[in-house]
Image (cartoon, grey):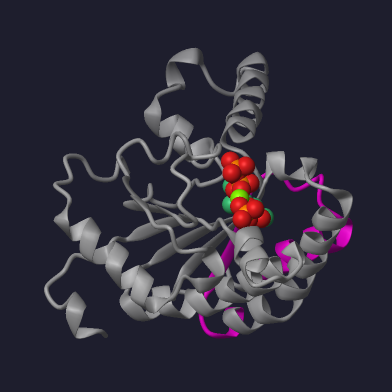
């Protein structure tokens, strides 16, 4: 453990909007896809850093419901990377006691990717180390729409009553069920917006923005974010 963290509160759950892969590549005269290659590798490297620093939950926004609007070449390159990482590095993490889950709508992903995800979730369900969530084809509004439809069906079929719906019900029926709300939300690359990420869940999260591009985000940067988090005067913690 780094001595700069001595006596500091470590956030239980850190959600990251990993942004800036394209600009990172552009700055080096490389194609955008090289930024995604580095960015994807950095997710794996950072899993171990989050774990080392004592963060229990790490949720990474890798691909949004809006990202399908990018060029076909870029989307395809990201999907190939996703498949390769699920099959290799994430499998390795699974052996290192990391629990892996996916949040987002899965049916739009290829059957092969869906199977890799389902297998990782099943194989790691009893792992007690870092709890890692990958947000793929994730959009907070889409997540809420899916939850609402499911709820409407349950009411129609008499499984629940309208008065059974409360804040806990909603938290328990989003993709993040069983996962505490983020204490800290980090966005890299200098953009200061939420881009449809975890809208319900971040109601009281501290927000931290850094100009660092995601492929350069490392242990030093995470320590800076945790130090800053400790300077905040949090009013309300987790709802769960
Ligand atoms: C984040 O990097 C990764 C994804 C959204 C897939 P970007 O691809 O958004 O990089 P910039 O924002 O164009 O630099
Ligand atoms: C947000 O980044 C989504 C992910 C990091 C996966 P974007 O780069 O896609 O978001 P906008 O377009 O800047 O809002
Ligand atoms: Mg971006």
Question: At x 67% / y 18%, what residue is drawn?
Answer: 157
Is residue 170 covered in magenta? Answer: no
Q: Residue 177 appears at what percent x and percent y?
A: 49, 46
Question: At x 24% / y 57%, what residue is drawn?
Answer: 229
Instruction: Identify the magenta region.
Output: 94-122
For residue 192, side relative to residue 94 (left or right): left
The vertical placement of 107 against 41, above or below, is: above
Q: Nearer the viewer, residue 165 or 176?
A: 176
Hey, which quadrant is residue 2 in on the image?
bottom left
Q: Residue 110 appears at what percent x and percent y?
A: 86, 55
For residue 147, side relative to residue 220 (left or right): right
The vertical placement of 49 against 104, above or below, is: below
For residue 62, side relative to residue 224 (left or right): right
Q: Nearer the viewer, residue 218 or 104?
A: 218
Residue 135 appears in view: no
The vertical placement of 56 against 105, above or below, is: below
Question: At x 20% / y 40%, what residue is drawn?
Answer: 236
Q: Nearer the viewer, residue 124 or 215?
A: 215
Q: Residue 209 appears at what percent x and percent y?
A: 38, 52
Q: Residue 224 appears at what percent x and percent y?
A: 28, 68
Residue 83 appears in view: yes
Is residue 101 covered in magenta? Answer: yes
Hey, which quadrant is residue 27 in on the image?
bottom right
Hey, which quadrant is residue 148 in on the image?
top right
Counting the numbered discs, the total is 0
Question: At x 27% / y 64%, what residue is drawn?
Answer: 226
Q: Nearer the viewer, residue 159 or 25?
A: 25
* Quarter placement of the C terminus: top left
* Quarter placement of the N terminus: bottom left
């Amino acid at each position: 453990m780094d001595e700069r963290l001595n006596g500091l509160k470590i956030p239980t759950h850190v959600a990251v909007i990993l942004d800036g892969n394209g600009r990172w590549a552009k700055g080096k005269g490389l194609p955008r896809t090289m930024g995604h290659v580095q960015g994807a590798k950095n997710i794996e490297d950072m899993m171990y850093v989050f774990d080392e620093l004592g963060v229990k939950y790490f949720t990474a926004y890798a691909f949004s419901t809006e990202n399908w609007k990018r060029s076909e070449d870029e989307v395809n390159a990201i999907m190939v990377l996703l498949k390769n990482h699920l099959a290799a590095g994430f499998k390795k993490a699974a052996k290192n006691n990391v629990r892996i889950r996916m949040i987002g709508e899965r049916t739009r992903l290829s059957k092969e990717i869906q199977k890799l995800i389902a297998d990782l979730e099943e194989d790691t369900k009893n792992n007690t180390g870092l709890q890692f969530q990958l947000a793929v084809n994730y959009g907070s509004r889409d997540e809420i729409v899916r939850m609402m439809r499911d709820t409407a069906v349950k009411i129609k079929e008499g499984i629940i009553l309208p008065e059974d719906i409360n804040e806990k019900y909603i938290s328990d029926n989003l993709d993040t069920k069983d996962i505490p709300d983020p204490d800290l939300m980090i966005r890299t690359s200098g953009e200061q917006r939420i881009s449809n990420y975890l809208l319900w869940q971040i109601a009281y999260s501290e927000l931290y923005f850094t100009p660092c591009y995601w492929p350069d985000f490392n242990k030093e940067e995470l320590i800076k974010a945790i130090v800053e988090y400790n300077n905040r005067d949090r009013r309300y913690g987790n709802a769960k």
